[in-house]
Image: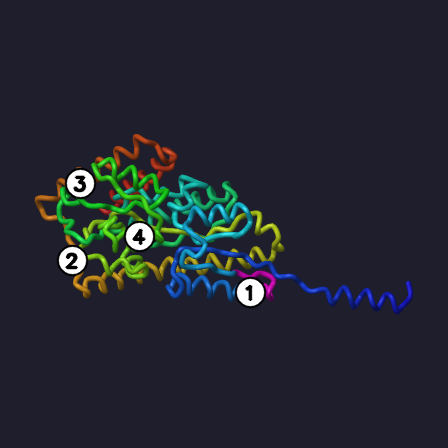
Amino acid sequence: MPKRLLTLLLLLIFATPIYATTLKIATLAPDGTSWMKMLRSGAEEVEQRTEGRVKLRFYPGGVMGNDNSVLRKIHIGQLHGGAITAGGLAAIYPDIQLYSLPFLFRSFDEVDYVRKQMDPILIHGLEQAGFISYGISEGGFAYLMSQLPLARVEELQQRKIWSPEGDQISLSAFRSIGVSPVPLPLTDVLTGLQTGLIDTVGSSPVGAIALQWHTRIKHVADIPLIYLYGTLVIHEKALKKIAPGDRAILKAVMEAHFQQINAKNRQDNLGARAALQQQGIQFYQPMDGERASWQQLIDKVEANLKQENRLDPALVQQLQQLLDSYRKSQG
Protein backbone atom coordinates (compact mmCIF):
# COMPACT_ATOMS: atom_id res chain seq x y z
CA MET A 1 0.00 0.00 0.00
CA PRO A 2 1.44 3.41 -0.92
CA LYS A 3 2.67 5.38 2.04
CA ARG A 4 0.50 8.31 1.08
CA LEU A 5 -2.67 6.17 1.08
CA LEU A 6 -1.74 4.59 4.42
CA THR A 7 -1.28 8.03 5.96
CA LEU A 8 -4.68 9.09 4.63
CA LEU A 9 -6.36 6.02 6.12
CA LEU A 10 -4.76 6.61 9.52
CA LEU A 11 -5.94 10.20 9.47
CA LEU A 12 -9.47 9.09 8.67
CA ILE A 13 -9.44 6.52 11.46
CA PHE A 14 -8.21 8.90 14.14
CA ALA A 15 -10.40 11.71 12.87
CA THR A 16 -13.56 9.62 13.13
CA PRO A 17 -15.67 11.23 15.89
CA ILE A 18 -16.74 9.27 18.93
CA TYR A 19 -20.50 9.58 18.95
CA ALA A 20 -22.16 10.18 22.30
CA THR A 21 -25.18 8.23 23.48
CA THR A 22 -27.80 10.59 24.86
CA LEU A 23 -30.32 8.93 27.15
CA LYS A 24 -33.63 10.78 27.22
CA ILE A 25 -35.21 10.62 30.68
CA ALA A 26 -38.66 11.95 31.62
CA THR A 27 -40.16 12.60 35.04
CA LEU A 28 -43.12 14.28 36.67
CA ALA A 29 -40.79 15.91 39.22
CA PRO A 30 -40.83 19.70 38.74
CA ASP A 31 -37.62 21.35 37.62
CA GLY A 32 -35.79 23.17 40.40
CA THR A 33 -36.63 20.60 43.08
CA SER A 34 -33.82 18.95 45.02
CA TRP A 35 -34.69 15.69 43.21
CA MET A 36 -34.00 17.27 39.80
CA LYS A 37 -30.90 19.13 40.98
CA MET A 38 -29.32 15.91 42.17
CA LEU A 39 -30.29 14.02 39.01
CA ARG A 40 -28.66 16.73 36.91
CA SER A 41 -25.59 16.62 39.14
CA GLY A 42 -25.34 12.88 38.51
CA ALA A 43 -25.73 13.42 34.77
CA GLU A 44 -22.86 15.93 34.77
CA GLU A 45 -20.62 13.45 36.58
CA VAL A 46 -21.51 10.66 34.15
CA GLU A 47 -20.73 12.86 31.15
CA GLN A 48 -17.42 13.94 32.67
CA ARG A 49 -16.28 10.45 33.66
CA THR A 50 -17.22 8.93 30.29
CA GLU A 51 -15.53 11.83 28.48
CA GLY A 52 -18.80 12.78 26.84
CA ARG A 53 -19.70 9.31 25.56
CA VAL A 54 -22.81 9.08 27.77
CA LYS A 55 -25.16 11.99 28.34
CA LEU A 56 -28.50 12.23 30.11
CA ARG A 57 -31.15 14.68 28.92
CA PHE A 58 -34.05 15.26 31.30
CA TYR A 59 -37.64 16.21 30.57
CA PRO A 60 -39.06 17.27 33.97
CA GLY A 61 -42.42 18.57 35.12
CA GLY A 62 -44.55 16.10 33.17
CA VAL A 63 -43.78 17.63 29.76
CA MET A 64 -43.73 14.10 28.31
CA GLY A 65 -47.06 13.22 29.91
CA ASN A 66 -48.01 11.02 32.84
CA ASP A 67 -46.23 7.81 33.80
CA ASN A 68 -48.28 5.72 31.37
CA SER A 69 -47.36 8.04 28.51
CA VAL A 70 -43.70 7.93 29.50
CA LEU A 71 -43.68 4.11 29.51
CA ARG A 72 -45.37 4.03 26.11
CA LYS A 73 -42.76 6.42 24.70
CA ILE A 74 -39.99 4.29 26.17
CA HIS A 75 -41.36 1.19 24.43
CA ILE A 76 -41.42 2.94 21.03
CA GLY A 77 -37.95 4.43 21.54
CA GLN A 78 -38.96 8.09 21.84
CA LEU A 79 -37.62 8.04 25.39
CA HIS A 80 -35.06 5.76 27.01
CA GLY A 81 -36.08 5.93 30.65
CA GLY A 82 -37.88 7.76 33.39
CA ALA A 83 -37.81 8.69 37.06
CA ILE A 84 -41.15 7.07 37.82
CA THR A 85 -43.26 6.37 40.89
CA ALA A 86 -43.98 2.84 42.06
CA GLY A 87 -47.61 3.19 40.98
CA GLY A 88 -46.50 4.26 37.52
CA LEU A 89 -44.29 1.18 37.15
CA ALA A 90 -47.02 -1.25 38.17
CA ALA A 91 -47.94 -1.72 34.50
CA ILE A 92 -44.60 -3.43 33.82
CA TYR A 93 -43.98 -5.03 37.22
CA PRO A 94 -46.96 -5.08 39.63
CA ASP A 95 -44.92 -6.15 42.68
CA ILE A 96 -42.96 -2.88 42.63
CA GLN A 97 -45.94 -1.52 44.59
CA LEU A 98 -45.13 -3.78 47.54
CA TYR A 99 -44.32 -0.86 49.86
CA SER A 100 -47.46 1.01 48.76
CA LEU A 101 -49.89 -1.05 50.82
CA PRO A 102 -51.96 1.48 52.82
CA PHE A 103 -51.11 1.84 56.51
CA LEU A 104 -48.25 -0.66 56.09
CA PHE A 105 -45.48 1.19 57.93
CA ARG A 106 -45.73 2.96 61.26
CA SER A 107 -42.33 4.66 61.29
CA PHE A 108 -39.27 5.38 59.18
CA ASP A 109 -37.31 2.90 61.32
CA GLU A 110 -39.59 0.14 60.02
CA VAL A 111 -39.10 1.41 56.47
CA ASP A 112 -35.31 1.30 56.76
CA TYR A 113 -35.31 -2.21 58.23
CA VAL A 114 -37.56 -3.65 55.51
CA ARG A 115 -36.02 -1.83 52.56
CA LYS A 116 -32.51 -3.01 53.40
CA GLN A 117 -33.64 -6.55 52.71
CA MET A 118 -36.41 -6.12 50.14
CA ASP A 119 -35.07 -3.42 47.78
CA PRO A 120 -32.72 -5.84 45.93
CA ILE A 121 -35.67 -8.18 45.27
CA LEU A 122 -37.78 -5.41 43.72
CA ILE A 123 -34.88 -4.07 41.65
CA HIS A 124 -34.25 -7.58 40.31
CA GLY A 125 -37.94 -7.85 39.40
CA LEU A 126 -37.70 -4.65 37.34
CA GLU A 127 -34.63 -6.04 35.58
CA GLN A 128 -36.55 -9.19 34.69
CA ALA A 129 -39.16 -6.90 33.10
CA GLY A 130 -36.48 -5.28 30.93
CA PHE A 131 -35.78 -2.15 32.98
CA ILE A 132 -32.57 -1.38 34.86
CA SER A 133 -33.14 0.47 38.13
CA TYR A 134 -30.56 2.73 39.73
CA GLY A 135 -31.99 2.56 43.22
CA ILE A 136 -35.23 3.26 45.02
CA SER A 137 -35.71 6.75 46.39
CA GLU A 138 -38.02 7.65 49.21
CA GLY A 139 -40.77 10.18 48.64
CA GLY A 140 -41.85 10.11 52.27
CA PHE A 141 -45.10 9.20 53.96
CA ALA A 142 -48.27 10.40 52.29
CA TYR A 143 -50.92 11.85 54.55
CA LEU A 144 -54.55 12.58 53.75
CA MET A 145 -54.75 16.34 53.16
CA SER A 146 -58.02 18.11 52.64
CA GLN A 147 -59.80 21.43 52.30
CA LEU A 148 -62.24 20.10 54.93
CA PRO A 149 -61.75 18.47 58.38
CA LEU A 150 -60.54 14.86 58.59
CA ALA A 151 -60.64 14.22 62.32
CA ARG A 152 -63.20 11.40 62.11
CA VAL A 153 -63.57 8.36 59.86
CA GLU A 154 -67.10 9.46 58.96
CA GLU A 155 -65.68 12.72 57.60
CA LEU A 156 -63.25 10.80 55.42
CA GLN A 157 -66.11 8.87 53.83
CA GLN A 158 -67.77 12.15 52.83
CA ARG A 159 -64.75 13.55 51.00
CA LYS A 160 -63.99 13.62 47.26
CA ILE A 161 -60.62 11.88 47.40
CA TRP A 162 -58.07 11.71 44.60
CA SER A 163 -56.71 8.33 43.55
CA PRO A 164 -53.61 8.22 41.30
CA GLU A 165 -54.50 7.16 37.79
CA GLY A 166 -53.64 3.49 37.26
CA ASP A 167 -52.98 2.81 40.96
CA GLN A 168 -55.28 -0.16 41.48
CA ILE A 169 -54.12 -0.72 45.06
CA SER A 170 -55.20 2.75 46.20
CA LEU A 171 -58.43 2.49 44.24
CA SER A 172 -59.29 -0.84 45.81
CA ALA A 173 -58.28 0.30 49.29
CA PHE A 174 -60.55 3.36 49.22
CA ARG A 175 -63.49 1.43 47.80
CA SER A 176 -63.16 -1.20 50.52
CA ILE A 177 -63.99 1.42 53.17
CA GLY A 178 -66.91 2.98 51.34
CA VAL A 179 -65.04 5.79 49.61
CA SER A 180 -65.49 6.44 45.88
CA PRO A 181 -62.20 8.02 44.83
CA VAL A 182 -61.68 10.17 41.74
CA PRO A 183 -58.84 8.76 39.57
CA LEU A 184 -56.72 11.51 38.02
CA PRO A 185 -53.20 11.78 36.60
CA LEU A 186 -50.79 13.67 38.81
CA THR A 187 -50.73 16.60 36.38
CA ASP A 188 -54.49 17.22 36.83
CA VAL A 189 -54.65 17.18 40.63
CA LEU A 190 -54.13 20.91 41.23
CA THR A 191 -56.84 21.76 38.71
CA GLY A 192 -59.10 19.22 40.40
CA LEU A 193 -58.57 20.93 43.77
CA GLN A 194 -59.18 24.35 42.26
CA THR A 195 -62.41 23.35 40.51
CA GLY A 196 -63.83 21.24 43.36
CA LEU A 197 -63.65 17.97 41.42
CA ILE A 198 -61.67 16.69 44.42
CA ASP A 199 -61.18 18.13 47.89
CA THR A 200 -58.77 15.60 49.43
CA VAL A 201 -55.40 14.19 48.32
CA GLY A 202 -52.80 11.83 49.67
CA SER A 203 -49.41 13.50 49.57
CA SER A 204 -46.11 13.87 51.33
CA PRO A 205 -45.44 17.33 52.81
CA VAL A 206 -42.69 18.11 50.32
CA GLY A 207 -44.83 16.88 47.42
CA ALA A 208 -47.74 19.07 48.47
CA ILE A 209 -45.49 22.14 48.43
CA ALA A 210 -43.60 21.29 45.23
CA LEU A 211 -46.85 20.69 43.33
CA GLN A 212 -48.59 23.71 44.90
CA TRP A 213 -51.34 21.54 46.39
CA HIS A 214 -50.74 23.11 49.80
CA THR A 215 -52.41 26.30 48.53
CA ARG A 216 -55.73 24.39 48.55
CA ILE A 217 -55.21 22.43 51.79
CA LYS A 218 -56.29 23.29 55.36
CA HIS A 219 -56.39 19.96 57.23
CA VAL A 220 -54.12 16.91 57.51
CA ALA A 221 -54.93 13.55 59.12
CA ASP A 222 -51.68 12.86 60.96
CA ILE A 223 -51.55 9.12 60.27
CA PRO A 224 -49.08 7.70 57.69
CA LEU A 225 -51.31 6.61 54.83
CA ILE A 226 -48.92 5.27 52.20
CA TYR A 227 -45.16 5.17 51.79
CA LEU A 228 -44.19 6.98 48.59
CA TYR A 229 -41.16 6.08 46.50
CA GLY A 230 -39.88 5.96 42.97
CA THR A 231 -36.89 4.93 40.93
CA LEU A 232 -34.90 5.87 37.87
CA VAL A 233 -35.28 3.16 35.25
CA ILE A 234 -33.69 2.90 31.81
CA HIS A 235 -34.80 0.38 29.22
CA GLU A 236 -32.23 -2.37 28.82
CA LYS A 237 -32.39 -2.03 25.02
CA ALA A 238 -31.07 1.54 25.21
CA LEU A 239 -28.18 0.51 27.44
CA LYS A 240 -26.95 -2.10 24.96
CA LYS A 241 -25.64 0.76 22.81
CA ILE A 242 -23.26 1.77 25.60
CA ALA A 243 -19.87 0.14 26.18
CA PRO A 244 -19.69 -2.06 29.33
CA GLY A 245 -17.19 0.26 31.02
CA ASP A 246 -19.42 3.28 30.50
CA ARG A 247 -22.46 1.33 31.70
CA ALA A 248 -20.55 0.56 34.90
CA ILE A 249 -19.81 4.27 35.37
CA LEU A 250 -23.47 5.16 34.76
CA LYS A 251 -24.58 2.57 37.32
CA ALA A 252 -22.08 3.61 40.00
CA VAL A 253 -22.75 7.33 39.66
CA MET A 254 -26.54 7.24 39.48
CA GLU A 255 -26.87 4.69 42.30
CA ALA A 256 -24.73 6.92 44.52
CA HIS A 257 -26.84 9.96 43.66
CA PHE A 258 -30.06 8.05 44.31
CA GLN A 259 -28.82 7.18 47.79
CA GLN A 260 -28.24 10.90 48.36
CA ILE A 261 -31.69 11.73 46.98
CA ASN A 262 -33.21 9.15 49.32
CA ALA A 263 -31.61 10.76 52.39
CA LYS A 264 -32.28 14.32 51.22
CA ASN A 265 -35.97 13.65 50.60
CA ARG A 266 -36.45 12.54 54.19
CA GLN A 267 -34.85 15.74 55.48
CA ASP A 268 -36.90 17.82 53.05
CA ASN A 269 -40.14 16.20 54.19
CA LEU A 270 -39.45 16.99 57.83
CA GLY A 271 -38.77 20.61 56.89
CA ALA A 272 -41.84 20.77 54.65
CA ARG A 273 -44.06 19.43 57.43
CA ALA A 274 -42.90 22.24 59.70
CA ALA A 275 -43.51 24.76 56.90
CA LEU A 276 -47.10 23.55 56.43
CA GLN A 277 -47.76 23.92 60.15
CA GLN A 278 -46.31 27.42 60.13
CA GLN A 279 -48.76 28.33 57.37
CA GLY A 280 -51.66 27.40 59.63
CA ILE A 281 -52.48 24.00 58.17
CA GLN A 282 -53.90 21.84 60.97
CA PHE A 283 -52.48 18.36 61.68
CA TYR A 284 -54.97 16.11 63.50
CA GLN A 285 -54.11 13.01 65.51
CA PRO A 286 -57.13 10.73 66.01
CA MET A 287 -58.92 11.54 69.23
CA ASP A 288 -59.06 8.79 71.86
CA GLY A 289 -62.64 7.91 70.91
CA GLU A 290 -61.66 7.71 67.23
CA ARG A 291 -58.60 5.49 67.44
CA ALA A 292 -60.66 2.30 67.39
CA SER A 293 -62.56 3.49 64.30
CA TRP A 294 -59.32 4.25 62.45
CA GLN A 295 -57.90 0.86 63.43
CA GLN A 296 -61.02 -0.89 62.14
CA LEU A 297 -60.60 1.00 58.86
CA ILE A 298 -56.94 -0.06 58.61
CA ASP A 299 -57.80 -3.71 59.33
CA LYS A 300 -60.53 -3.67 56.68
CA VAL A 301 -58.15 -2.29 54.04
CA GLU A 302 -55.51 -4.92 54.86
CA ALA A 303 -58.01 -7.79 54.75
CA ASN A 304 -59.43 -6.66 51.41
CA LEU A 305 -56.03 -6.30 49.74
CA LYS A 306 -54.88 -9.70 50.97
CA GLN A 307 -58.05 -11.29 49.61
CA GLU A 308 -57.57 -9.71 46.18
CA ASN A 309 -53.94 -10.93 45.86
CA ARG A 310 -52.90 -7.97 43.72
CA LEU A 311 -49.31 -8.63 44.78
CA ASP A 312 -47.25 -11.81 44.99
CA PRO A 313 -48.51 -13.44 48.23
CA ALA A 314 -45.02 -14.80 48.96
CA LEU A 315 -43.51 -11.29 48.82
CA VAL A 316 -46.28 -9.86 50.99
CA GLN A 317 -45.72 -12.64 53.53
CA GLN A 318 -41.95 -12.04 53.53
CA LEU A 319 -42.48 -8.32 54.12
CA GLN A 320 -44.97 -8.95 56.92
CA GLN A 321 -42.59 -11.37 58.62
CA LEU A 322 -39.87 -8.72 58.55
CA LEU A 323 -42.23 -6.18 60.10
CA ASP A 324 -43.38 -8.62 62.77
CA SER A 325 -39.78 -9.50 63.59
CA TYR A 326 -38.79 -5.85 63.87
CA ARG A 327 -41.78 -4.92 66.02
CA LYS A 328 -41.11 -7.79 68.42
CA SER A 329 -37.48 -6.73 68.72
CA GLN A 330 -38.67 -3.26 69.69
CA GLY A 331 -40.96 -4.60 72.38
Q: Quadrant of residue 324?
A: top left
Give the Cα distance between marks 1 and 4: 35 Å
Magenta span includes 253: no
- Which is nearer the N-term, disc 3 or disc 4? 4
Q: Is residue 158 left or right of residue 260?
A: left
Residue holding disc 4: 189
Q: Which residues are magenta?
A: 48-56
Residue holding disc 2: 282
Q: Nearer the viewer, residue 84 or 247?
A: 84
Q: Is residue 136 left or right of residue 46?
A: left
Residue holding disc 1: 47
Residue holding disc 3: 295
Secondary element type, mark 2: strand
Q: Residues within 10 Å of mark 3 (few under 14, many from 20)?
A: few
Give the Cα distance between marks 2 and 1: 45 Å
Which is in the foreground here, disc 2 or disc 1?
2
Amino acid identity at mark 3: Gln
Give the Cα distance between marks 3 and 4: 28 Å
Secondary element type, mark 1: helix
Where does residue 187 sit, x and y in percent of width and height? 36, 53
Query: Where is the N terminus found, in terms of image quarters?
Result: bottom right
Secondary element type, mark 4: helix
Which is in the foreground here, disc 2 or disc 4?
4
Magenta span includes 50: yes
Q: Nearer the viewer, residue 216 or 51?
A: 216
Q: Are marks 2 and 1 in contact (CB under 8 Å)?
A: no
Which is in the foreground here, disc 3 or disc 4?
4
Amino acid identity at mark 1: Glu
Where does residue 119 sit, x and y in percent of width and height? 41, 47
